[in-house]
Amino acid sequence: MDTIPLDYATLRLIWWLLLGILLIGFAVMDGFDLGVATLLPAVARTDEERRIVLNVIGPVWEGNQVWLILGGGAIFAAFPPLYAVSFSGFYIAMFLILVALILRPVGFKFRSKVPDPRWRAVWDWALFASGLVPSLVFGVAMGNVLLGVPFHFDDTLRVYYEGGLFGLLTPFALLCGLVSVAMLVMHGAGMLAMKTSGAWPRARGATAASPPLRRRCCS
């Protein structure tokens, strides 16, 4: 029985659906990792509380981050021109995300090496940055996708990005970045409320996950 090959439009739709599933999986699975790291200075006051908070994401962050790697691989496999122009045109933004994500394993590894409170405070803030920066940049990127990004083709049909990093920081894109941070922080707060057993981290996580109006009414 002869098989009918799929046309380009159908293959493109399938790959976009696959890419969407991978990025949604990253937002859902790794989103609470970023949110918990962002909430670290707010919900944990003592070293014991910080260890409780970090233990929520310590065993699972590596597996959750695979969703982002698969998403990048899907873009490279299905849309090489998009991959090339995105990673070259948005080089500084990608660099910020990579540095922030690299800080996470480094922070987990080195935080407990020295019992000095100042040493641990430095790595706690590094872990905080590893959650806040990607959350903000991903939201700004989504805002720019909705607005449209300036590209052009040369005579050989090669794609070039015409803008720069500061050109991406429009008011709407920054608003999307703040919305992204708020959503992932709420996601992380809900996970803290479910997973932590310490009284203070759990109560602060539940407070951070509750809407402000509800907190005022119930306080």
Image: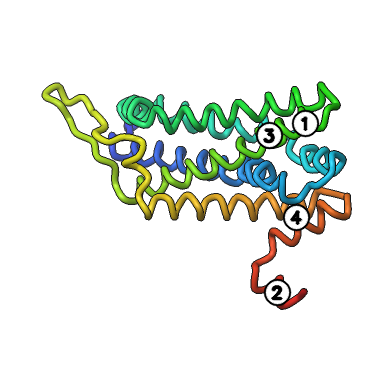
Q: Distance between the residues labelled 4 and 2?
A: 16 Å
Q: Could you give the CA–CA distance between mark 2 and mark 3, rounded to whole angstroms?
A: 33 Å
Residue name at image x 81 percent, y 51 percent: 201
Nearest the viewer among 27 and 162 is 162
Q: What residue type is labelled 1?
A: Arg
Chain-order first, disc 4 or disc 2: 4
Instruction: State the residue position of label 1.
Output: 118
Secondary structure under badge 2? helix
| Placement of 85 over or under 215, stated as above or below | above
* Residue of label 4: 205
Foreground: disc 1 or disc 4: 1
Which is in the foreground here, disc 4 or disc 3? 4
Looking at the image, is mark 2 or mark 3 nearer the viewer?
2
| Image location (x, y in percent) of residue 150 | 24, 40
Q: Residue furthest bottom?
A: 217
Residue 45 is left or right of residue 29, and the answer is: right
* Mark 2 closeness class: few <14, some 14–19, many ≥20 residues within 10 Å: few
Kindly tell me whether residue 32 is visible in this rendering. yes
Q: Inspect the image, locate mark 3, and give the three-letter code of the amino acid beneath it.
A: Trp
